[in-house]
Amino acid sequence: MRFVVAGAVIRPAPSGAGAELLLAQRSYPADVAGLWELPGGKLAPGETAEQALVRELAEELAVTVAVGAALSEQVPLRADLTLVAHWARVLDGVPRAVEHHGLTWVDADRLAAMAESGVLVPADTAWVPELLTYLRRQ
Ligand code: DCP
């Protein structure tokens, strides 16, 4: 089994109420281009999920992140590929769309609206309930 790790990158909302989540708009492949995801990528041989997430977010967002606990859901992508996610925070840098079409910080209401309108990458919708709970509780 191989793994893909995605980052639930969060920050306190600028308003002071709740928290925000970073979403990235995929630029490829065609079937998911334009949809929004938690950024990340495949573990390289010998890497832990935490190490892979630090590397992928440095490559894709040009930031250094601190990686926290895993989210509860593991999502089967294919028979041999499983998607996991970890909470993360930016330690250094300002996220920039190096490989994505764009980036956006969303609060709970915006995330719920995006999930409802079908603009999230399908696999990532598994995390929406846990993400909404976290974003609303902060
Ligand atoms: N994926 C997903 N949701 C995410 C991140 C990834 O469903 N939040 C899926 C999309 C791909 C697979 O995981 O089917 C691998 O993702 P990436 O293409 O982003 O990973 P890499 O950049 O490591 O792979 P590659 O270099 O092959 O594009």
Image (cartoon, helix red, strand yellow):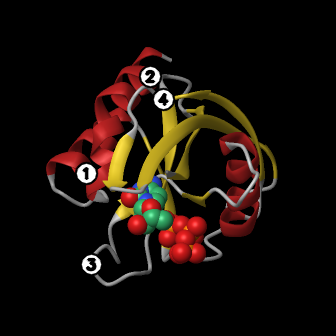
Dots 3 and 4: beta carbons under 8 Å?
no
The residue drawn where x is 49% and y is 51% is: 1
Whichever of labels 1 and 2 marks the residue nearer the N terminus, that label is 1
Q: Residues within 10 Å of mark 3 (few under 14, many from 20)?
A: few
The residue drawn where x is 76% and y is 58% is: 55
Q: Which residue is mark 3?
A: 31
Q: Is residue 10 left or right of residue 133?
A: right
Q: Which mark is residue 114?
A: 1
| Residue at the bottom extreme of this rendering | 30
Query: Which of pointers 1 and 3 indicates the residue nearer the eye?
Result: 3
| Residue at the left extreme of this rendering | 117
Q: Which residue is mark 4?
A: 71
Whichever of labels 3 and 4 marks the residue nearer the N terminus, that label is 3
Q: Is residue 35 left or right of residue 69?
A: left
Whichever of labels 2 and 3 marks the residue nearer the N terminus, that label is 3
Q: CA distance from mark 4 to mark 2?
A: 11 Å
